[in-house]
Amino acid sequence: MKLINSAHDCSIGGLLVTLCESAFQNNLGFRAQGLKYKEKRLDSLLFGETQSRIIISIDKNDLQEIEKYLKEKNCPYQVIGEVVENYLEISLLGIKINTSEIKNIWENALTNVL
């Protein structure tokens, strides 16, 4: 049985970059309303390149089964939000932006600077 729809590590750019890259690939978005700030520094939470941190997406109906498995394996996890269409929202930062707008900035950043 397949429970994971997608997985992406946070080793290059951290959590926020990983969420954006994952959204951009399929022209989707995300709502991160469950993001908890336990770090000493907010930049560490959002951009820390912890190699063992992985973002997965699943079907909502499989959440209990995934949580049961992670608890059995003593694997720490946090449900941080959900996949949505058209926008990126991070409640912790009060940010909500259209996916295509931020994707355009991402894809053209170097060109715009030069």
Image: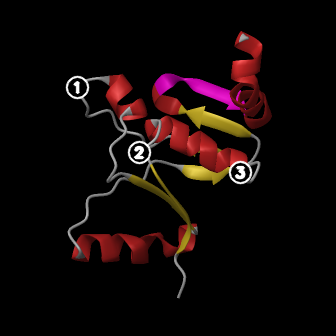
Q: Residues within 10 Å of mark 2 (few under 14, many from 20)?
A: some
Q: Residues within 10 Å of mark 1 (few under 14, many from 20)?
A: few
Distance between mark 3 and mark 1 Cα atoms = 31 Å
Looking at the image, tell me whether mark 3 or mark 1 is earlier in sequence order: 3
Q: Name the residue type under label 3.
A: Gln
Residue 37 in sight:
yes
Report the disc number at residue 103: none
Q: Which residue is mark 1?
A: 40
Q: Is residue 34 above or below residue 38?
A: below
| Model colouring | secondary structure
Q: Is residue 78 left or right of residue 22?
A: left
Looking at the image, tell me whether mark 2 or mark 3 is earlier in sequence order: 2
Q: Residue at x 42, y 31 (%)?
A: 47
Q: Residue furthest front?
A: 114
Q: Name the residue type under label 1.
A: Lys
The residue mark sitting in front, 3 or 1, is: 3
Q: Which residue is mark 3?
A: 25
Q: Residue at x 36, y 34 (%)?
A: 48
Q: Is residue 63 left or right of residue 77?
A: right
Q: Is residue 24 left or right of residue 10?
A: right
Considering depth in this image, is 88 or 6 the residue closer to the camera? Answer: 6
The reply to whether callout 2 and callout 3 are in contact (CB within 8 Å) is no
Q: Name the residue type under label 2.
A: Ser
Q: Is residue 39 above or below residue 112?
A: below
Q: Which residue is mark 2?
A: 11
Residue 60 position by quadrant: bottom right
Screen quadrant of the C terminus: top right
Considering depth in this image, is 12 or 48 the residue closer to the camera? Answer: 12
Looking at the image, tell me whether mark 2 or mark 1 is earlier in sequence order: 2
Which stretch did the figure color magenta? 93-98
Q: Position of residue 109 (x, y in %)?
A: 70, 21
